[in-house]
Amino acid sequence: MNPDTIPQNRPLTDSFGRHVSYLRISVTDRCDLRCRYCMSEKMQFLPRSEILSFEEIDQIATAFIDRGVRKIRLSGGEPLVRRGVLDLVDMLGRHLDSGNLDELTMTTNASRLAEFAERLVDAGVRRVNVSLDTLDSETFRYITRWGDLDKTLQGIAAAKSAGLKVKINMVGLKGLNDDQIVPMMRWCADQGHDLTLIETMPLGQIDDDRQDRYLPLDSVQRQLENQFSLNPLAERTGGPARYWQVEQLGLKLGLITPLTNNFCDGCNRVRITVSGKIYMCLGHDDNLDLRTALRKGGREALDALLDRAMLMKPKRHDFAIGSDSRPSVERHMSVTGG
Ligand code: SAM
Ligand code: SF4
């Protein structure tokens, strides 16, 4: 096609008619914790020479925003361990000021949130997702391998007092924290946080066998329904989460059940790794190298690759936790940031 005839800022629509309006950016693959379901203890991280600069992340994010992305989530690894990450948040925050972006959010383990919460608010961030799989300090240390629950709770408290709305993400782990789901629901309700339970997904090789810890959330939901009234909420975010209002607690509860349910029909998101690869689906390995396109061909080459990415976005993931211990996808969740 003659480049002159291609409309600028054409929307990002895939071959199934789904419009991409949500971008997740992994700003580092590194982390200060090693949650057992996410990483192995010894991880090979990308050399620094491979990672995008903040300016490059900003250029890529801006191309997406020009083409209709309205929401960006920064994730990782642990986004707050990347040095100077608040400079990136400030850069991206200008799109909130201009009205071209509706929301800039972050997913964090909160270990450093106490230090950064106020500056996040200053940059325009209004909500954060925090991973917290248990309120028991021993279990917390075991799951994260060396994490300190107090630091995480301090980070969450600082976020709340800075005015950030907090959603807690809790990965359900059979025999590890399944007895702590109700206490977590009560704590979140007391604190005014939303809570989302997540099924462990077969992403990346870890030291444990995921099959051993896999907790299907449809059975958790049935148990909760014996104890609480769960009223379904219409709210959908284009991802695999479904939401309920837990009447007795006044709690908004989300369930992310990619294994027991599939909600790919309304998928509105793509993911960028810190080395500039775009992944069109969390459950597939297909990717394209935006970094090379940007460095060699600038914005035009980047836009052309985004068009190609839209044609490659698959209809649905094909995750399965099988009888063998191999992951469905080789890369860890920390590469694409959840
Ligand atoms: N470090 C940050 C954190 O933990 O919130 C952000 C990155 S972490 C990869 C993003 C989310 O993915 C967290 O809520 C974490 O619990 C979840 N996660 C990591 N590995 C997972 C897996 N294999 N299956 C399901 N959720 C996973
Ligand atoms: Fe780090 Fe988050 Fe993965 Fe835990 S879940 S190891 S905090 S990236």
Image: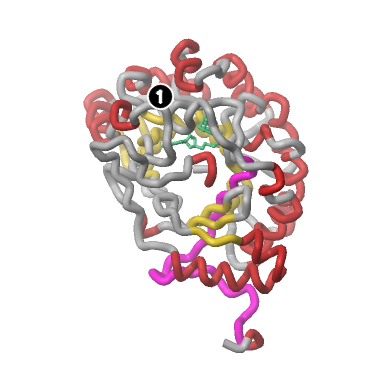
Q: Is residue 122 left or right of residue 259?
A: right
In the rendering, at what x and y percent does residue 203 appear? 41, 41
Residue for point 73% across, 59% down: 98
**Dominant secondary structure, magenta:** loop
**Can you say which quadrant of the picture contains the N terminus?**
bottom right
Which image quadrant for residue 67? bottom right
Residue at position x 62%, y 22% in the image: 157
Asked whether residue 222 is in view, the answer is yes
Any part of residue 128 in sight: no
Give the left or right position of residue 288, taking residue 180 as reference: right
Residue 263 covered by magenta stretch? no
Q: Is residue 150 above or below residue 321?
A: above
Q: From the viewer's perspective, is residue 201 above or below residue 225?
A: below
Provide residue 303's location: percent of width, then percent of height.
62, 70
Q: How is the image coloured?
A: secondary structure
Q: Which residues are magenta?
A: 5-28
Q: Is residue 295 above or below residue 284?
A: below
Nearer to me, 272 or 124? 272
In the image, 79 versus 31, the foreground residue is 31
Task: Please name the amino acid that badge 1 sits on.
Answer: Met
Nearer to us in this view, 174 or 12: 174
Up/down of 304 relative to 241, above or below: below
Relative image position of residue 219 (x, y in whole percent)? 23, 32
Mark 1 is surrounded, within 10 Å at the Cα level, by few (under 14), some (14 to 19) or many (20 or more) other residues, namely: many
Look at 29% across and 44% down and name the residue there. 320
- Write down the residue under mark 1: 185
**Image location of residue 205, percent across then percent down:** 42, 36
Q: Which residue is at the far top?
A: 138
Q: Residue at x 56, y 50 (%)?
A: 24
Disc 1 is placed on an element classified as helix
Q: Please tell me which residue lies in front, 51 or 195.
A: 51
